[in-house]
Amino acid sequence: MLRGWLRLRAGFYDEASRFAETSARPHGTGGAEVRLFAFHLGGHERRVSLSLAGDFAERYKNGGLSVGFWN
């Protein structure tokens, strides 16, 4: 997309059931990471990013937000 500024991720997986009477549960996952700014420290460029991720299934929703370093 915007090379060096935006990363998008998407995926899908089946979670195996822990119980004999139920079947596997499909999950959809996704995320995005955007580079916010860069600075120099110790002779190296450090790039700070903001990430958002999610995992969704029947009766299950999970999300995350983080600030970190772009590698």
Image: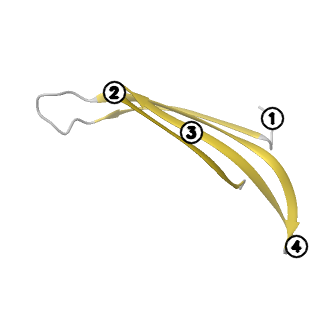
Left or right of 69 on screen, residue 22? left
Which-is-in-front pick, marks 1 and 3? 3
Name the residue beneath numbered marker 3: 53
Position of residue 23 measured from the top left corner of the image (x, y, whole percent): 21, 27
In the image, residue 60 lies at what x, y percent? 37, 31
Say which of marks 3 and 4 sits in front.
Answer: 3
Instruction: Kindly check if marks 1 and 4 are in contact, taking CB atoms under 8 A apart as contact.
Output: no
Query: Which residue does the numbered mark 1 point to in the structure image?
Result: 2
Tell me how far mark 1 sits from mark 4, CA to CA.
26 Å
| Crowding near the residue tagged with mark 3, few <14, some 14–19, many ≥20 C-alpha atoms within 10 Å | some
> Mark 4 or mark 1, which is nearer the start of the sequence?
1
Marks 1/3: CA–CA distance: 19 Å
Q: Earlier in the sequence, mark 3 or mark 4?
A: 4
**Callout 3–callout 4 Cβ contact below 8 Å:** no
Q: Which residue is mark 4?
A: 43
Near mark 1 (Cα within 10 A), the count class, few <14, some 14-19 or many ≥20, is few
Chain-order first, disc 2 or disc 1: 1
Q: Which residue is mark 2?
A: 59
Q: Residue at x 17, y 28 (%)?
A: 22
Of the residues tagged 2 and 1, which is closer to the observer?
2
Question: In what quadrant of the picture does the C terminus appear?
Answer: bottom right
Identify which residue is drawn at 56% across, 39% down. 53
Where's residue 17, x and y in %?
Answer: 22, 35
**Left or right of 46, for residue 59:** left
